[in-house]
């Protein structure tokens, strides 16, 4: 059996059956080509949607929210903090929480249900400001935190929690005005680099940041790592990490494309006809 070239002709007086076979083959080819194109389009759409799908909330048991509660955080900033935490509660995320000013501490270990944040939300509500009172919320941390801020120490603690719990490819969501002590800047740069080396992704929600603080973080992490506070209040998903699960839809669509191509080769190829007697194969 061999495939005849396009220029080859078959001397036959009974071409009716061949015409029917040709029409059927063309129809099968058309159907399979349309199916392959549709599956490829679906696979492309699924691939484009991976980031949006995986960024709905912090990945399960692999995210830590780091919250700045230093005295430079104002009432408006507390509103953004509460909105962010509320969205994580609504998404039923699993996460850890680190709070800090000059000294950080672990409030919730990684993998804790976000519902445990509900009592904390009530403690982050600013009250009405007066001439002598900026309206900052009164909470258990007000007395222990000072005006000094060391962001590097909070990020180091979050990284150590991942190592302690054996979590790889974790995500840190930092809520801060990005104001840190001047002597902390070199240590902050080293800390962010070590987190990146450990495959830990760092995202930042800037809370009324000064230009210097934003410039430092944009230089160290890139502009894409900073999430505008306006996105926190919107319905747009927070890009706080990638899902650890497999893209099942993309894999299934890719497998179906291969099946369709195999079917095309099996049923839509050229006709194989017997080699005429006396001619070499």
Image: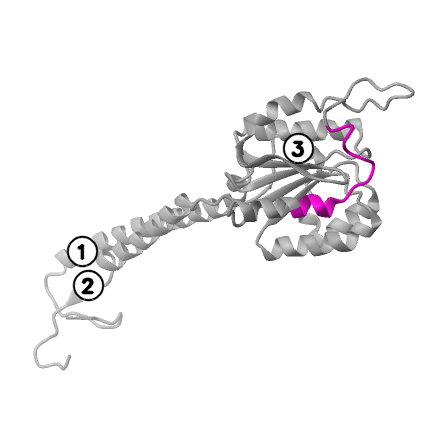
Q: Quick one: label 1 or label 2, which is nearer the N terminus?
A: 1
Q: Which residue is mark 3?
A: 232
Q: CA distance from mark 1 to mark 2?
A: 9 Å
Which residue is more in the foreground, 277 or 176? 176
Q: Label 1 crowding class (10 Å Cα cut-off): few <14, some 14-19, many 20+?
A: few
Which secondary structure dominates the residues rendered in magenta? loop
Q: Nearer the viewer, mark 3 or mark 2?
A: 3
In the rendered structure, are the residues bearing label 1 and label 2 in contact, judged by CB atoms less than 8 Å apart?
A: yes
Query: Which of the image's four quarters has the N terminus?
Result: bottom left
Query: Which of the image's four quarters has the C terminus?
Result: bottom left
Q: Quadrant of residue 86?
A: top right
Q: Which residues are magenta?
A: 141-156
Q: Is 56 left, or right, of 227 in this rendering?
A: left
Q: Which residue is mark 1?
A: 21
Q: CA distance from mark 3 to mark 2?
A: 61 Å
Q: Which residue is mark 2?
A: 271
- Residue 81 can be seen, yes or no: yes
Q: CA distance from mark 3 to mark 1?
A: 61 Å
């Amino acid at each position: 059996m061999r495939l005849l070239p396009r220029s080859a002709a078959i001397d036959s007086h009974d071409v009716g059956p061949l015409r029917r076979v040709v029409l059927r083959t063309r129809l099968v080819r058309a159907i399979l080509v349309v199916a392959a194109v549709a599956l490829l389009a679906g696979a492309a759409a699924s691939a484009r949607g991976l980031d949006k799908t995986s960024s709905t909330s912090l990945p399960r048991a692999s995210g830590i929210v780091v919250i700045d509660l230093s005295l430079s955080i104002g009432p408006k900033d507390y509103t953004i903090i509460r909105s962010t935490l509320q969205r994580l509660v609504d998404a039923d995320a699993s996460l850890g929480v680190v709070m800090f000013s000059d000294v950080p501490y672990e409030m919730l270990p990684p993998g804790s249900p976000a519902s445990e944040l509900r009592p904390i939300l009530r403690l982050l509500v600013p009250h009405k400001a007066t001439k002598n009172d900026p309206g900052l919320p009164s909470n258990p941390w007000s007395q222990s935190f000072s005006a000094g801020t060391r962001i590097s120490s909070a990020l180091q603690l979050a990284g150590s929690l991942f190592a302690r719990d054996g979590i790889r490819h974790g995500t840190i969501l930092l809520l801060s005005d990005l104001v840190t002590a001047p002597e902390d800047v070199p240590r902050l740069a080293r800390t962010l680099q070590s987190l990146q080396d450990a495959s830990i992704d760092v995202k930042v929600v800037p809370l009324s940041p000064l230009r210097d603080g934003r410039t430092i973080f944009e230089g160290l992490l890139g502009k894409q790592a900073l999430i505008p506070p306006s996105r926190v209040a919107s319905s747009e998903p927070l890009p706080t990490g990638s899902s650890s699960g497999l893209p099942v839809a993309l894999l299934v669509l890719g497998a179906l494309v291969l099946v369709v191509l195999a079917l095309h080769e099996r049923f839509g190829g050229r006709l194989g006809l017997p080699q005429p007697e006396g001619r070499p194969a």
